[in-house]
Structure formats: C-alpha cells, structure tokens
Image (tube, rainbow, N blue to C red):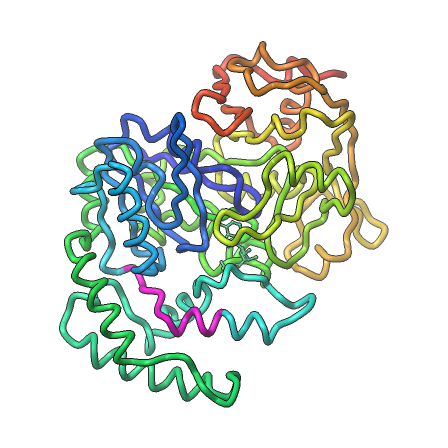
Amino acid sequence: MPGLCVIGLQWGDEAKGKLVDWLAEGRDLIVRYQGGANAGHTVVVGEEVYKLHLIPSGIVNPGIMNLITAGVVIHPGTLLGEIDSLLERGVDIADRLQLSGRAHCVMPWHIVEDKIWNQVNSGDENIGTTLRGIGPCYRDKVGRSFAVRVSDLIQGGLEKQIHRITEYKIQSLAPFCENGEVDLDASQIFAEYRQYAERLRPFIADTTRLLLDAVDQDKSILFEGAQGSLLDVDFGTYPFVTSSNSSGVGVSSGTGVPGQWIGKTIGVAKSYSTRVGGGPFPTELHNDTGEHIRIKGNEFGTTTGRPRRCGWFDAVAVRYTSRLSGTDSICLTMLDVLSELKEIQVCVAYELDGQRIDYFPNNVDDLQRLTPVYETLPGWQTDITSARKLDDLPPNARSYAGRLSELCECPIEFISVGPDREQTIVLNPDESLLDSLVS
Ligand code: IMP
C-alpha cells in the first residue's frame, strides 16, 4: 500500500500534529524522518493535550508502531523525557516505538555551538534557531569526523569517542567563550550518555529494514514531516532555514523508502502565515491585525515559547511549496482564527524591481526586497468553531478557502476550525469549494 505523507507548506507550526493524529487511525506505522527536538507537535485528545518534540504524533493512538528514522537528529535526554511523560500519563509505549541506529545524536557540544553561532551572527543575519543543537549536529553528520550515531551509544568505544570529540570541541570553541572556558566535561558527558544508552537500548533498531519489509508486506505507512517546506535546507528561504529537508523531498532520504512508495501527500497550510526566528517574510504584519492573529491563534512557539511573527496567507509561497512537495490535497488549518476580521488579504503575486512576478524567488535578497500584491476578501465575522461540514461554514469563509485552493492550484481536503479532533471538516471529493466562490 503506497505511503501517505503529511508535509507543512509554510514555515512550520501549521498544526500538522492534529492531522497526523486524525490520519493515524488504522495505520500500521507512523514515521518521523527529519529534524529533531526543534519541532513541537501538539495533539489534543478530549481533555488531554500532548506536546511532543521527537516522538511521532501517532503514539497517542493505541496499537500503532512509531518509528524515528535515520534522517532525524535525536537528543536522547529529550526523547527519554517524552517517553517518561507519556508513560506517566498511561500511554503504552512498549513495543510501539523504534529508533534508527543510523540517526544522529545531539550532543552537549552541539547545544554550546548553537548558542555561540546565534550570538556571533547578530541582527539581520541571525537565523534565530531554536538553540536545540540541530544545525551543529547535522553539520557534524555531514562532516563525519565528529559525529555520534544512535548505534554508537550501544557499541563499545563510546567513552573514547566522546573524549576525542570533546577535546577537539573544547579547542575549537575556546576562542568564542568567556575566558576561553568551554562548559564541556568529557567524563560527565560519557556518564550521562551511558545512562541514556541503557534506557534507549530496547528501542534501537534497523528502521530502514523494518520499513522496507513493511512496504513489501503492504502495510499502511504515514510519514510525518516536521517544520515546513519554506524551512527546507535546499529549497527554503536559505540561509534562514532549518538544517534538514523539511519539504516533501526529504521523505525518501530520511527514511530509506524509495519515492515510488509514496502514494499521497497532504500539505498542511495555516489560513494565514507565521514564522519564528529571522528571515524574509513578505506578508508579515507589523500592526494590530498581526497582533490580533497572534493572540487569537496563540502564536507562541511550542518549543521555545517565542512569539511568532504573523501575516497574511501567501499564495505564491504555498503554490511553490505545494508543487515542490507534490501535494495531492491541502489541509487548511486555523480558519477560525480569522473569524473576527472584517476583511482578509491574500498575497497573489509579488512586485520585484517594478515587475509583477508570480513565482517564489530562489534567493533571499530578492525575497527581502519584494513587496506583496494583495487581493482583499470579505471576512465572515461569525464563530465557526462548531462547523463540522462545509455547509456549516458561512459563505465568505467557504469563498476564502475556495480562493486559496484556486490560487495554490491544489484541492482542499480538510478544513480545521479548532484544536480538537472533532473540529475538522472533511470535504468529499465531489464537494468543490470553487462552486462557492463569490464572483
Ligand atoms: P533550528 O532548526 O533550530 O536550527 O532553527 C532554524 C530556523 O528554523 C529558525 O528560524 C527556527 O525558528 C525555525 N524552526 C525550527 N524548527 C521549527 C518548527 O518546528 N517550527 C517553526 N520554526 C522552526
């Protein structure tokens, strides 16, 4: 059975966790394949709110196997903290979580490096990372000489490896630390990671083989993307991106499953735009409307608590990422957040050096310079949080969603009107939003 993917189409935080949780029912495996504890997924089930960073959102669905594959960078302490908190809340993890031995470990020096580079690159050049050591860990993975893989945790030689790398890191980081003192102690790090290793041992497996076998056995697989396509290290707003392939192109490289086994991709897009950290954001609002969206949408980072930058929906950007990720349909989230607005703007094109363009520029200088071209749509000013089917939505809300679908050249399959599982409208394939467009 071809796999299903859920990919964020903006700069992350599109509320993917809720859709993954919804789609997880009846699946055999849920797979997290890139990023690390920089991600934050919130899953609400009734009264229970689960905040996850590394473990796939499917863990709250009993009976499903959850995999963290080779493309992920894992901070073992964070992962164990999540495991413990799920166990405390009665979520059965036993035999339902497997961790790739090929995945890389975020080590204490990665966190030190992340902090240092964030301080060194200040002002407009600051990426504003989540400080979870993600970039430094991926850099060491590609560099190879100073990397620690999950499988290294349980093989002989870890102590020597940690001492060797710590020595090098202390030497190279000393010039950037106060009084040349780098807060890293190899013996302490080894003691800490040895403990992690013992606790993680039962979860470590060859997830590549497991997945390829699952494909052969026609199992139903859901791939859960983290972050969003505009943060993709190759195709996003580089260098203001994360360090992994967070668009649809990352599924194969992060899992080892050939692209031919990916049958359907659902792109998740918020009804407006947000971004955390630095970098270009053409439709950003620096006014009361932006503040209104931030408060109504509770737009504060799950991982860092930072206020998110808010702005109008950018249809040029989402059309680009939707094509890039090969999305078959879109899940439009947080539509209820816009309910009080009289008018809503959508970016339909950009103006760059006096020319109107309808594509997403591939370099950050152009992205910083362009101005958005907006279309204004009427708001609906009605509470829509209890809508459960398309007909429950006011005509202007349907028109808004329909226009986004038209501009992004992709059908909408789901509309989310609140955080709860039930607050989801599923569109039938024959239900065209475009019919409801106000001309
Ligand atoms: P890093 O992934 O911590 O290196 O951060 C790089 C950039 O990606 C920063 O702008 C972060 O704010 C952003 N970022 C990383 N993870 C997420 C996420 O899960 N949601 C939204 N932004 C993220």
> If the image is split into quadrants, where does the C terminus sit?
top right
Q: Is residue 85 left or right of residue 305?
A: left
- What residue lies at 65% left-to-right and 68% top-to-bottom? 125
Q: Position of residue 371 (x, y in %)?
A: 79, 48
> If the image is split into quadrants, where does the N terminus sit?
top left
Height in image: 282 above or below 146? above
- What residue lies at 27% left-to-right and 48% top-to-bottom? 83
Q: Quadrant of residue 150?
A: bottom left
Q: Quadrant of residue 166?
A: bottom left
Residue at the farthest front position: 88
- What residue lies at 52% left-to-right and 30% top-to-bottom? 330
Q: Position of residue 270 (x, y in %)?
A: 58, 35
Q: Quadrant of residue 23?
A: top left
Q: Out of 383 and 316, give the one closest to the viewer.
A: 383
Residue at the farthest top position: 391
Q: Position of residue 107 (x, y in %)?
A: 35, 69
Q: Is residue 258 left or right of residue 176?
A: left
The stretch in magenta equals 103-114
Height in image: 412 above or below 171? above
